[in-house]
Image (cartoon, rainbow, N blue to C red):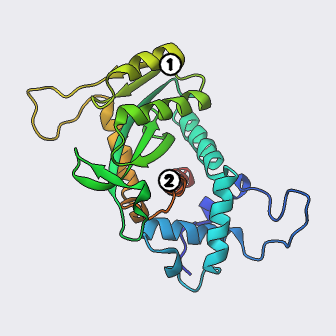
Amino acid sequence: MYPSVTDAQWVILQPLLPAQGNTAGRGGRPEKHCRQIILDAILYLVRGGIAWRQLPVEFPPVGTVYAIFLRWIRGGVWHRILDTLRDRLRVRAGRDRCPTAAIIDSQTVPVADTVPRSGTEWDGAKRTTGVKRHIAVDVTGLLLGVVVTAASIQDRDAGHRLLAILRGTFSTIRLVWADGGYPGRLLGWAKSVLALRVDIIKRKPSNTGFHVRPRVWVVERTFGWLLKYRRCVRDYEAKPEHHEAMVLVATIATMTRRLART
């Protein structure tokens, strides 16, 4: 076996999973495979960056694992697990469960040759054909929301959708920091429609190359955490919501490891 979920992590994750079997009252067979092994398989795939059909034979059948992965996307399971783990980490750090500020940024990743080209385009700034993931994090770098678009979509355009999700999920957030890719009408729209103040943190003209910018470095560190999971290094997904789920699973794995160490 290839353990991706330790016993300590399983104690944390098990209560957060949905009830087994059919919960809609229409019958159906009970689940055949252990939930811990199913999670093992999904996390093994996300960490190793392999294709679904390359899952080792020691895991349950690929079709079963993939079907549960999709079922949990449709049921919002990954989002609920993420929210619960983030709340626990914030409380453990001495912060309020609900954040009052956020940081947003985007990251372009190249696309694999197996992905349909319909959802991928050219990012002229990064000189990359792929997709762009736009994320919001709290001041400690914990994920608050993610939106995946074609790489050609400008940050300020995707920012409308990301900020709307942020406001719909967190009524407590009042301040958002962003880099220079989010200028223009987005700031006025966020203030008048969402009651969010967006502060732009620009690069200093005197600085060349990489330099640490206040607040923005936090979200850049989160992108670094995601790139430890090879399934997030490239886009292998046929649908944006599947890529978003991969980001959620990678973040859940990182959070669970932190909680399991205590």
Q: Residue furthest front?
A: 118
Residue on which the image places disc 2: 240
Most foreground residue, 128 or 118: 118
Looking at the rendered structure, the secondary structure element under dot 2 is: helix
Q: Residue furthest bottom?
A: 57
Type of the residue with mark 2: Pro
How many tags in the picture?
Answer: 2
In the image, residue 201 lies at what x, y percent?
28, 25
Q: Residue at x 39, y 45 (%)?
A: 222
Which part of the image, by quadrant, shows the N terminus?
A: bottom right
Label 2 vs 1, first from the N-terminus: 1
In the image, residue 24 lies at what x, y percent?
86, 56
- Can residue 95 be seen here? The reply is no
Q: Residues within 10 Å of mark 1 (few under 14, many from 20)?
A: some
Type of the residue with mark 1: Arg
In the picture, the disc for residue 174 is 1
In the picture, the disc for residue 103 is none
